[in-house]
Image: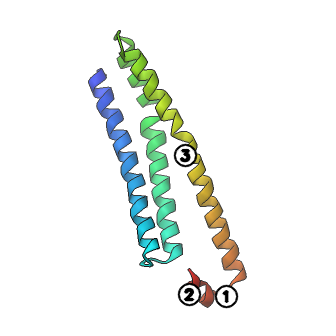
Amino acid sequence: MTIQAARAQLALAVEGTWAAIGDLAGVRSRLGSGESDLTDVLAEVVAGMDAATLRYWQCVRAYDPVAQLRDATRRLSGPWPAWRRSVEDSARQCEQPFALAGDALRVCCQELCELARSTPYDQLRRTS
């Protein structure tokens, strides 16, 4: 794989991840406007977060894309090896925000389940 192809593949992976995250912002705005039910929105957010996380791990951090990027820059000199290291460092820094978002979603789901257990169904639908 050439450096141009590796850069293009990385750019596509990052763009797709950002698109999945952008979809979550639209879901959030619908909730703020009262257009959607909380349980429906939470399900959409969980699905969107799962899609973004999967894309991150498969297209940015997986062995194949990293190995292709390393192979492409290993043959080159000059700024390319340093650039590759900065790309890898930047990709690693995204891991914690994904983990924190996943933790927050788990807490939301747990709270909804606890609320559902302690609240009659009719009342739960009106408050969510």
The 10 Å Cα crowd at callout 2, few under 14, some 14 to 19, many 20 or more, is few
Tell me the quarter of the picture where residue 35 sits.
bottom left
User: Would residue 37 appear left or right of 80 to someone viewing this image?
Assistant: right
Q: Could you tell which of marks 1 and 3 lies nearer the N-terminus?
A: 3
Q: Residue furthest front?
A: 32
The residue furthest right is 118
Marks 1/2: CA–CA distance? 10 Å
Q: Residue sitting at 46 percent across and 22 percent down?
A: 85
| Residue 22 visible at all | yes
Q: Amino acid at mark 2?
A: Arg
Side of 110 where 18 appears, left or right:
left
Q: Earlier in the sequence, mark 2 or mark 3?
A: 3
Name the one closer to the observer, 81 or 121: 81
Query: Label 1 to label 3, Cα distance in Å?
Result: 35 Å
x and y percent of residue 23 in the render?
39, 59
Q: Are marks 1 and 3 in contact (CB under 8 Å)?
A: no
State the image coordinates of residue 69 (x, y, percent, origin top left). Answer: 39, 24
Q: Is residue 99 above or below residue 122?
A: above
Q: Which residue is mark 1?
A: 120
Camera-near label (1 vs 2) is 2
Q: Place residue 36 in its image quadrant.
A: bottom left
Read off the residue under disc 3.
97
Dot 1 and dot 2 residues touching (CB under 8 Å): no
Mark 2 sits on what residue? 126
Callout 1 environment at 10 Å: few (<14), some (14 to 19), or many (20+)?
A: few
Helix, strand, or loop for circle 3? helix
Residue 91 in the figure: left or right of residue 80: right
Q: Secondary structure at mark 2?
A: helix
Question: Across the whole image, how many numbered discs are drawn on residues?
Answer: 3
Mark 3: which amino acid? Pro
